[in-house]
Image: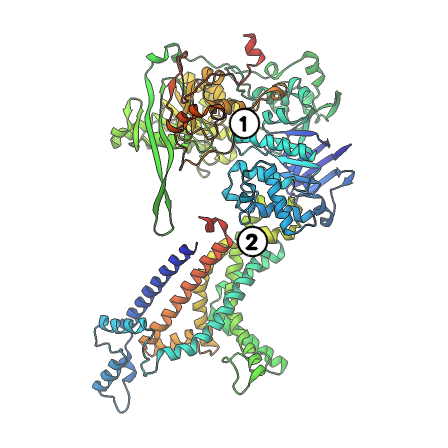
Amino acid sequence: MGKYLLRRLAINVLLVAIAASLAYLLAASSLNPQVNFKGRNPPVPEATIDKTLDQYNLNPKKPLLERYGTWVSGVVKGDFGQTWEGDSVNEEMGRRVGVSLRLLLIGTILGSGLGVLIGAFAAVRQYKLSDRVIGVSSFVIMAVPVFVMATMLILAATGLNNAAGSKLIEFVGEYSPGLTGWDQFANRLVHLILPTISLCLGQIAFYSRIQRNMMLDVLGQDFVRTAMAKGLRRRTALFRHALRTALIPAATYFAFAFGTLLTGATFTEKIFGWHGMGAWLVDSINQHDVNAVAAVSTFAAACVLVAGFLSDLAVAALDPRVRVS
Amino acid sequence: MSILEVKDLTVTFPGGIEAVRGVNYSVSRGEVLGIVGESGSGKSVTSLAVMGLLPRNAVVSGSVKLHGRELLGMPEDDQIKVRGKTISMIFQDPLSAFTPVYTIGDQIAEAVRIHQKVGKDKAARRAVELLDLVGIPHPGVRAKAFPHEFSGGMRQRAMIAMAIANDPDLLICDEPTTALDVTIQAQVLEVLKTAQRETGAGIVMITHDLGVIAGMADRVLVMYAGKPVEQGPVDELYYRPRMPYTMGLLASIPRIDGEEGPLVPIEGNPPSPAALPPGCPFAPRCPMKIDACDDEEPPLTEIGGGRHVACIRSREIEHKGLTGADVFPVPVIPPNDVVRIPREQRPTVLELNDLIRHYPLMKGAVFKRRVGTVHAVDGISFDIAEGETLALVGESGCGKTTTLQQIMQLEPPQSGRIVVLGKDSGKLGKEDRKALRGDLQIVFQDPMAALDPRMPVGDIVAEPLRAHGRKNVDQRVAELLTLVGLDPSYAERYPQHFSGGQRQRIGIARALALEPKMLVLDEPVSALDVSIQAGVINLLEELKNTLGLSYLFVAHDLAVVRHLADRVAVMYLGRIAEIGTVENVYDRPAHPYTQALLSAIPLPDPEMERTRKRILLEGDLPSPADPPSGCRFRTRCPKFARLSEAERRRCVDEEPSVVRLANAVDHGAACHYAEEIEVITASDDQEEK
């Protein structure tokens, strides 16, 4: 088993490398940092631009593969290069990774956990009113793009704040400056509410649909009947035998769902004014910042593959049939 | 004092489907009640209703009393104290009846801990004890295994262990051995008897197999269309049935000790519970039907001797001493002309010479590597003469299906030779192969899966004709449907409108479309109910005789084989253990495996079942990836166990090949110490002849 996971890990590292390289090559061949110097007054001399860009390994006049080589030799040493303004990409990333991970982790845990529970609940109450309400809402949520959802949440929060007459829910930035200690912590939590909801809803909808189907497959199985024939309560039998077994396929979807979560995070960060990796990606594409784009892509690839690895681990932990062979 | 008393039990599903319409029975301590019926007769629903495990939308009425306490309508809090404690249930399919993600030991320990206040360690120890009791080797180690690591027979043993964990007063067994091979079935039935001895419980045994009931039950209840139609002590009911349905059922079963000739079929199909006929539900299929049968449904009335019958003509049946063979019309099957020519002078239609098929055993998810070889078919030879039926029998995993696939592919085999109708499959061109396919056709096991549900029956039958560019397709389809006993107007309908037996007839019509010379029958009747099965077997026999076909018949039911086949080849782990004419192999089996196989088959005859001595095999089939050295059967061979050390040497070192037995023309066995013995006592009517 350990050998199997080690091999999976090695394959994942290889895949991250390929994904990052492709992202760099795409960014480096399509983005042009020279544009940032154009139209300045007084105009920046061509030689200065070249010199600056050469310094940051961003000059499109250099052959693509040569720039790629320089980038790779840096990345191998853990250095993702510099932004077009000369700042260290690593430092900027260090600031932003925490912001994004906070959103992503909470989004993943809440989204998958609640989604699974709601899906299982809907399956047990199949064709009852609660099941239908859950079904229709999930489809509506999945059909609404994240940025529309986020805007609607902001409108609702504004309405609520106005009605209450005070700022119950804050939704701009990560925290209000000037607070310390517990106040700051509580303030951060308040700021987390809306972005988390906007990120989670889609995940919950997605997982609830999947889990409902898996659970329905399992509910009709003989072993649930056996569990009840042993003398377990219906609820216990459903929870301990049916849900536990139905979790296995849902765990494999974990990796897929994480991809959509990353996309959702980009919009969410941008809309709620969080300075995370997603917002940075949008900004750096606008600024033709090749190294930053490549760094964010590498981060995304690593995240997806970590999710995939975790999903492998989860399946192995949940399903003895995989573990043994 | 009866443990369980069921009165006027009815179960109605949404849509007004009355699955059970008034069942009465009682079970006493230590008594075995057999409930017999075909699929859809409501026998399983009855037992689920007793357990309170029916889906919530089922409406149950009547009364179920356990030790005088009413179970129906009991709140869940009280129900769970009874379930698994006083009543336990053993389900049919042991693979799906265990939760795949917990170990067997944990699941048994869970059953212990639900009803007994014991610690985890103690429950785990009790689970190991129980596994030991049901005869699982190395119970301590096996308790930590997951359900998928157990074989079918082991799982069913574990299921029994779980059911007796809390010393129940009543065990309900729902088709406990239907999914198992015969030798394993014999083992499991032994375990059930042990379990009953240990617990002294009453048993309700639900099955469609009249042989199993004959050997186990004290009393029998026969169900038809949701109602009991006959009830009584097992001997009375088997030897003197008083209801035409029971009579037909008993007469329609092929028996391994029976004579050849047509079986007695019950015409028609069981009624759908949504559309019951007026009056007696069996009337439309009953040869003794009179006008009064349609007036009202006869109640189950007592006729003395603890017997109950629901038939208005039961007195008459008793008076005249009628049996199934007297009442039900026995079809006349025209004789086979080809057989008059001696076998040696007939052309050979199929010849297999040392056929080998090995599969690589792969391991690894990304980088696959070969870790072994599955010896699916490991050198088998046989031939089929024109107009002959050769049956290939053996338990699951013995290589029957692989052999069939190799023949049907018409490709060069891995090793060995396949000659179909004089043509070597290794030397066929593309055109020849297609032409040959018309002469070699197949009928599949599962008639539900073998027909495209979106295609009208006419198109299904016409497909091979169109594929081979035949003309007059419609006319031929009508001919074919008539040939298999279906109305030509059925061509417009879809497979879902037909019952299992009719679907199998459609499958046969499709196989006959190109006028083949040879048919391969892959378990053609194993998915059918007993009363339907007889009709299909008769049809196959008739088609063979009228059309001059030859059959390669694959089956695990040795009783069916005895009826249909001329010669039989017994397979074990990819090799042929014994081969010969049906009379030789059945009456004088020489290979210890054949002997065990034949002795494991339950006979629908209570008296004989009680007096029979079974040769029980130990353990399960070894893995075909790692067959034992020398003789493959030696690990389970009862004879090997009796041999001296010096004699055993030969079994371990030298692989026996099929050798013709000294005093027989067509009988060979692959055993170094082959010895003919009689396993099945000839039935009375045979002795008279």
The subunit carrying tag 2 is A
The x, y position of residue A195, in whole percent, is: 51, 73
Which residue sits furthest top?
B689
Q: Is residue A121 above or below residue B438?
A: below
Image-based side of B127 in relation to B151, left or right:
right
Disc 2 marks a residue whose amino acid type is: Arg
Residue closer to the observer: A269 or B509: A269
Disc 1 marks a residue whose amino acid type is: Leu
Q: Which mark is residue A244?
A: 2
Image-based side of B108 in relation to B376, left or right:
right
Looking at the image, which residue is at 66% across and 51% down? B119
The x, y position of residue B597, in whole percent, is: 50, 25
Inspect this view and state whether residue B93 appears. Answer: no
10 Å crowding of disc 1: few (<14), some (14-19), many (20+): some
Residue closer to the observer: B308 or A292: A292
Q: Which residue is mark 1?
A: B616
- Residue B629 falls in image quadrant: top left
The subunit carrying tag 1 is B
In this rendering, which labeled residue sits more in front, label 1 or label 2?
1
Q: Is residue B605 above or below residue B359?
A: above
Image-based side of A210 in relation to A26, left or right:
right
Looking at the image, which residue is at 64% across and 34% down? B195
Q: Is residue B57 above or below residue B658?
A: below
The x, y position of residue B661, in whole percent, is: 40, 15
Judged from the image, the secondary structure of the residue bearing numbered disc 1 is loop
The lab-note entry on whether marks 1 and 2 share a chain reads no
Image-based side of B13 in relation to B472, left or right:
right
Q: Are marks 1 and 2 in contact (CB under 8 Å)?
A: no
